[in-house]
Amino acid sequence: MPAKPIAPETLQLIDAVRDALLDCTAVEEKTMFGCHVFMVDGKMCLGVENDELLVRLPPASHAQIAEMPGVRPLSSRGLMDGYFLVGPTAYARREQWQHWISEALAFNPLAKATPKRKTGSKASSETDSKKPGDGESPAGQGTSSGRKRTRAAPKPADADAPRKHPIFDSE
């Protein structure tokens, strides 16, 4: 079954997150549980689901954040503690947007990485024997979209000028 097309608003939000992570190293984009997520240093840090921003935040702030208007936990059953979906009303202004991005990036070095799953010996030997030329690109194995950046992209000459992203058209 072909993948469902992504709405233009969602693509704009993904681009805005990408722009916010330009100075970060070791950024990888993946599709996980219906979200377009951004892994920073091997840990899920930010993401986009439809028109909502997915952020991972420190445990000390969970109760306070859950009470904020426009913000809800990713899982109501507590399966993904620490992950919140931030609705458009909670990131509509540039200051709000920057707050969520900064908080998620500040917590990322302290966040625990999910341990890699161990596979059975037969499954791992079959996977290990696959070569990148066997129909998959080296970065495209698994659920990864294959977009990996290991160092910061060079900044354009006008990088210090304030940029306006389409998600902030109301400013």
Image (cartoon, rainbow, N blue to C red):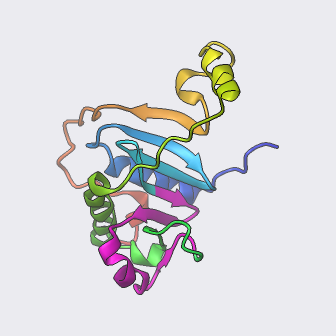
In this view, which residue lies farthest toward the right? 1
Closer to the camera in the image, 151 or 8: 151
In this view, which residue lies farthest toward the front? 121
Closer to the camera in the image, 162 or 123: 123
Quadrant for the C terminus, please.
Answer: bottom left
* Residue 68 location (% of width, % of height): 40, 85
* Residue 92 location (% of width, % of height): 39, 73
Closer to the camera in the image, 146 or 75: 75
Q: Is residue 9 above or below residue 87?
A: above
Image-based side of 71 in relation to 126, left or right = left
Q: Residue at x 56, y 67 (%)?
A: 79
Image-based side of 76 in relation to 42, left or right = right
Q: Is residue 161 above or below residue 72?
A: above
* Residue 20 location (% of width, % of height): 32, 52
Q: Residue at x 36, y 66 (%)?
A: 57
Q: Is residue 128 above or below residue 25?
A: above
Q: Magenta residues, as a range?
A: 47-75
Q: Residue at x 27, y 61 (%)?
A: 102
Q: Is 160 inside the magenta-drawn segment?
A: no
Q: Residue at x 60, y 29 (%)?
A: 141
Q: Quadrant of residue 8?
A: bottom right
Image-based side of 36 in relation to 44, left or right = right
Q: Is 69 inside the magenta-drawn segment?
A: yes
Closer to the camera in the image, 118 or 33: 118
* Residue 86 location (% of width, % of height): 45, 72
